[in-house]
Image (cartoon, helix red, strand yellow):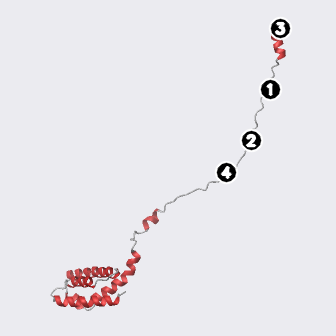
Amino acid sequence: MLENKQIEQTTPIVEQPVAAKPEIKVEQPVAAKPEIKVEQPVAAVKAVPSTPLSTPVVSSQSKVEKDIEGILAKGLDNTFLSMDTATQQEFKKKGEETSKAIVLILQSAKVKVKKIINLIVSWLRIIPKVNKYYIEQEAKIKAEEIILKYKK
C-alpha cells in the first residue's frame, strides 16, 4: 500500500478544466440577392401578328405596281366592262400577276423588254374575240410606256 501512496503523492491528479476555444463569430453582411421575376407576356406574344420580313419592300413596290397596273389598264375600260364576270375576275387576277412580274423584271440589272411584251400579250389574250395583231401592238405600246417611265 505504500507504493500506492507514493504514486498518489508523486503524481497528483489535477482536473483542470479544458480551456474552450472562444468562438469567434464574424458576421459578414450577406449581399441581398435581387429577386428575379421572369414573366412571359403571353398576351403580347399572341397579339403580335406574324408578318413576313419583306413587308416594307412590298409597301414601297405597291406604288410602282399600281402605276404599272394603271398603264396596263389604260384604254381597256370598255373592253373590261363588256366581259362576263368570270372572265373579268380572271382578267383582273392575271393583270395583277403580270404587274408583279413586270416589277421584278424592272428591278433586275438587265431589263428584257421582250419578256415584258410576252407577259402583256399573255394577259391580253384573255380578252375574247380580239385580233392577235391588235394584242401585240397594244402590248408593245404598253411595254414602251412602262420602260420609259421606269428607265433607270
Tag on residue 16? 1
Residue sitting nearer the eye, 152 or 140: 152
Image quarter (top left, top right, bottom left or bottom right) of the N terminus? top right
Looking at the rendered image, the disc whose residue lies closer to the viewer, 3 or 2, is 3
Left or right for 49, reference 140: right
Q: Pinpoint residue 137: horizontal percent, then vertical percent.
A: 21, 91
Res 57 → quadrant: bottom left
Label 3 to label 2: alpha-carbon separation: 49 Å
User: Closer to the camera, 10 or 38?
Assistant: 10
Q: Position of residue 23 (x, y in %)?
A: 74, 39
Which residue is labeled 3 in the image? Answer: 2
Q: Are marks 1 and 4 in contact (CB under 8 Å)?
A: no
Q: Amino acid at mark 4?
A: Val
Q: CA distance from mark 3 to mark 4?
A: 66 Å
SS category of the residue bearing label 3: helix
Choose mark 3 or mark 1, whichever is in front.
3
Q: Earlier in the sequence, mark 2 or mark 4?
A: 2
Residues under numbered marks 2 and 4 in contact, where contact means CB atoms less than 8 Å apart: no
Image side of residue 135 versus residue 54, left or right: left
Please name the amino acid that badge 3 sits on.
Leu
Q: Amino acid at mark 1?
A: Gln
Quadrant where the image shows the C terminus: bottom left
Q: Which residue is mark 2?
A: 24
User: Which residue is the site of mark 4?
Assistant: 30
Q: What's the residue type where badge 2 is placed?
A: Ile
